[in-house]
Amino acid sequence: KQEVTQIPAALSVPEGENLVLNCSFTDSAIYNLQWFRQDPGKGLTSLLLIQSSQREQTSGRLNASLDKSSGRSTLYIAASQPGDSATYLCAAANRDDKIIFGKGTRLHILP
Amino acid sequence: SAVISQKPSRDICQRGTSLTIQCQVDSQVTMMFWYRQQPGQSLTLIATANQGSEATYESGFVIDKFPISRPNLTFSTLTVSNMSPEDSSIYLCSVWGTVDTEAFFGQGTRLTVV
């Protein structure tokens, strides 16, 4: 059974810093891994999708990497801004056709 | 991409009653899912909504409590039955076109049971 873990659970950093959010998964038989952002009381916004055959994806200040062999993905945020404050969720799309989520990292960017 | 309309966006319900949540997608999709997000928690998969057949439920979720319908490839409903305060959560509909594409989510239904 797939388990997805995110570290840290919460993170506060000053504005302008670069930061890394970590995601690990126990079953490497995935179709893809997706990173989402969730603002308080809101739904999910898709940030990046990495296919199982890919190593990384980039969108603006965001870069996500995937290492299937070690069961890890990272989300790198460059030059953080207060507007980046949110909860970030990673989700693994499994070969049993289910998407399993981690518990998320609550990010707070200090102005 | 897929645009998902989920209704209602929020509701406050009396215990013992039932609420039906609707999920409408702007295109035909292969897979639709229902998730629950309890306060301060991540998303937990309730079930896979199968078109034309009974939904597939995850461990801990049963059809009598969470009946699901999916009459076609663009629409599904989730009913939360005989509600108690413990059912207070956000319920989210998700769609997946094919296994190597993005998953998309509705904006969720915030349910409060009093």
Image (spheres, coloured by chain):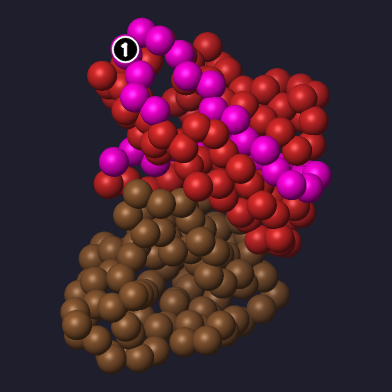
B91 on left or right of A52: left
Helix, strand or loop under label 1 = loop
Q: Tell me residue A19's x, y (percent).
A: 32, 84
Q: Residue at x 34, y 24 (%)?
A: B12
Q: Residue at x 46, y 37 (%)?
A: B9
Q: Is residue B28 magenta?
A: yes
Residue B74 visible from this viewpoint: yes
Which amino acid lies under the numbered mark 1 shown in the image of this protein?
Answer: Arg
Find chain A in the image and tell me its colour: brown
Chain letter, red in picture: B
Q: Which residues are magenta?
A: B11-39
In the figure, residue B18 lies in which quadrant? top left
B26 on left or right of A105: right
Name the residue carrying label 1: B15
In the figure, residue B30 lies in which quadrant? top right
Q: Tell me residue B91's x, y (percent).
A: 46, 36
**Picture layout, residue B8 above or below residue A31:** above
